[in-house]
Amino acid sequence: MAAKSSADDGRSRRLGRRPGRRRLRPHDQAGVVTYVILILATLVSAFPFYWSIVAATRSNSEINEVPPPFLPGGGLTGNFEQANEQANITEALVNSTIVSGTVALGTVLACTLAGFAFAKLRFRGRGALLSFTVGTMMIPPQLGLIPLYMMMAKLGWANELQSVILPTLVTAFGVFFMRQYLAEALPDELIEAGRVDGASHFRIFWSIVIPIARPAMAVLGLLTFMTTWNDFFWPIIALSQDNPTVQVAINSLGGGYVPDQSVILAGTVLGTLPVLVVFGLLGRQIVGGIMQGAVKG
């Protein structure tokens, strides 16, 4: 094998190519049609957000003109101020950051622990518990709203952030996702080596499992953060306009006989920016985790 590799490298040098690099075949190279389709798909996907930015910088009368403006104006600051006066967007951003960050952190830690237990530990009833956990994903969440709200009210947590945080700290999807990842990515030999060295289950989890599960943890954390940030159904029931999250606050914008669409879209853009920042920081982890899982499969 080594002789064959050396011969290939020598042949590459004689032909004027760098050794170790494979020439792209014609069918491996993207054509003009591929680039055109990708550019069109990108423009179609980005246009709604661009239009939201344009509308957020204009007045309500300007965005209803025919034809409508397609370039940003100079009313962004004024629309932001009106949105903050109507719905207290600043407090909503802080609340959503607290809720989404806490839920994402709790979900990642709890689901990684549970996924490790289901994937690598042997205990009685493991299969039944895993089946029950996955089975809860089949139950529509709307069925549990009334009992859940009654429980939050009895605890005195109505209109408090903990009523939104605690019910979503652990998800069945997160447990199943981490279990599937660790079952493939975590070798049993590493766990046995840790046990031979006298490490406890917690030490094995902290020193062996977490470094291996880091890509999947990043993917789960980002997906959970974005899902919690965009959640509207349960926060609109558990919270009020006095202590809202971003989605609850945006729901109260543009009141009146004629809704002010520029103010609504200004609040929407302001509430979308943190998600874009988080996705920009951790988006590569999602792609890397998906590609790593595809290669393992």
Image (cartoon, rainbow, N blue to C red):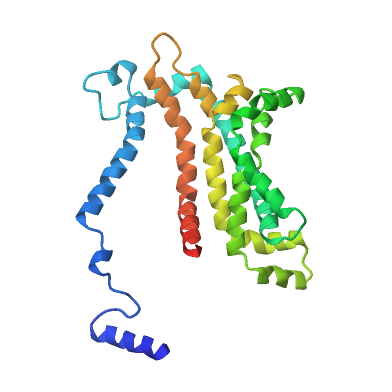
The x and y percentages for residue 255 are 46, 13
Residue 223 lies, with reference to residue 123, above or below; the image says above
Q: Looking at the rendering, which quadrant does residue 193 occupy?
A: bottom right
Give the percent coordinates (x, y) of residue 229. 54, 35
Say above or below: 211 vs 220: below
Identify the residue at image location x=52%, y=40%.
Answer: 226
| Residue 249 in view | yes
Q: Residue at x 63, y 46 (%)?
A: 134
| Residue lying farthest to the bottom in this orientation | 3
Relative to 52, say whether 119 is above or below: below
Residue 171 in view here: no
* Residue 191 image point, x, y percent: 70, 67
Q: How many numbered discs, if any?
A: 0
Extreme residue in the top direction: 257
Quadrant showing the N terminus = bottom left
Residue situated in front as seen by the camera: 90 or 27? 27
Residue in the picture at 67% in, 35% down: 167
The residue depicted at 68 percent of the width and 55 percent of the height is 118
Between 285 and 136, which is closer to the camera in this rendering? 136
| In this view, 164 is above or below 153 | below
Task: Tell me if 134 is positioned left or right of 289 in this view.
Answer: right
